[in-house]
Amino acid sequence: MADSGWRRRPVIDIGGGRPPLRLPALPRPGGGALRLALVLLGLFILAFTSYYQNEADEVAVVQRFGRYVRTTEPGPHLKIPFGVETATKVPVQRQLKEEFGFRTVRPGVRSEFAAPSTETMGESLMLTGDLNVAVVEWIVQYRIRDPRRYLFHLRNVHHTFRDMSEASMRQVVGDHSVDEVLTIGREAIGQQAKEELQRLCDKYQNGVEVQQLVLQDVNPPDPVKPAFNEVNQAIQERERAINDAWADYNKAVPRAKGEAEQAVRAAEGYALERVNNAEGDAKRFDALYEEYRKAPQVTRKRLYLEAMTQLLPRLGRKLILDDKARGVLPLLSLEAPGKEPKP
């Protein structure tokens, strides 16, 4: 006979012809523990399906039967359990990164990169505006600005975002020459591609904010690298020659300008000196003339004496003779020039 879950009722004979007394049956030893375990399991499932916690850099988008109802901020929160409401966490404060043309295997001080594949080569190979080919590798850093749009406005937002980034880069590279892409125009190309990518994100309303787009590496294709290196070497030599010529120009021109300025200033000083001297001589002559008018004889004699005072020291050895002298030998020294005669 199958066990009904209760023990057989014990029969107690109390005597006296009375019918036997039957006691109520007791439950099996494991029944209460099983119910307690089921209650605890239900409480655990209730707590597990109703409690969730957002980290400091993320929010949670709550859906009720698949329909959006609210967005919760960082911290602990509750939701309707048993799958009625679901919470999808989105890292809105974290900077995310997408790589194009290469893949990083192990980031660090000396990062390791995966070998080129068909996918990465297809992303990086581009046609420039002058119908040349360049291998362009770049990185896009972005942040999720609107988690609701990020989750619900596009079916596959990550794949679509990569397609938009590649389309933006190809459009900008196609508007520039290969020299600009490889050398001087990389920063401008990155900025234009970032602006175009942000325009597409706003147009598609995917809730993404593009923070930075950086050209990681730009090279010519492997078959033309030797020729391109020779061209770059020739360009560098040309730039070096131009810089050397400008250096010589910057040395010679200022020196010539300085010498010309010096000559001009010297001529101006000489002209000023001549004018001042002429004006001084004229004023001196006027003053002398006034004195001559007052005393002609005295002034004439004074002028004569001043002239002799300036002239006689320049004549060297001088002999002054009396008109009655018979000869000059007694007066001449027979010693060697420069020696005084003995007494």
Image: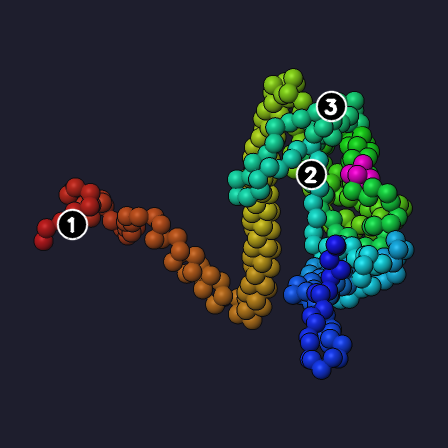
Q: CA distance from mark 1 to mark 3?
A: 104 Å
Residue 119, x across and y down, in percent: 72, 28
How crowded is the residue under tag 1: few (<14 C-alpha within 10 Å), some, or many (20+)? few
Q: CA distance from mark 1 to mark 2?
A: 108 Å
Residue 34, x across and y down, in percent: 69, 63
- Res 224 → quadrant: top right
Camera-near label (2 vs 3) is: 2
Secondary structure under the numbered disc 1 in the rendered image:
loop
Looking at the image, is mark 1 or mark 2 earlier in the sequence? Answer: 2
Q: Is residue 94 visible?
A: yes
How crowded is the residue under tag 3: few (<14 C-alpha within 10 Å), some, or many (20+)? some
In the image, what residue occupies the spot 78% across and 42% down? 158
Residue 330, x across and y down, in percent: 17, 47
Q: Is residue 53 visible?
A: no
Vertical order, 260 against 94 (above or below): above
Quadrant containing the N terminus in the rendered view: bottom right
Which mark is drawn over residue 99? 2
Q: Main secondary structure of the magenta part?
A: helix
Q: Which residue is mark 1?
A: 340
Q: Residue furthest left?
A: 343
Q: Which residue is mark 3?
A: 133
The one of 42 and 275 positioned closer to us in this rendering: 42
Looking at the image, is mark 1 or mark 3 earlier in the sequence? Answer: 3
Colouring chosen for the image of the structure:
rainbow
Secondary structure under the numbered disc 2 in the rendered image:
strand
Residue 182, x across and y down, in percent: 68, 31
Q: What amino acid is found at the position of numbered circle 2 in the picture?
A: Glu
Q: Which range is magenta?
A: 159-163
Q: What amino acid is found at the position of numbered circle 3 in the picture?
A: Val
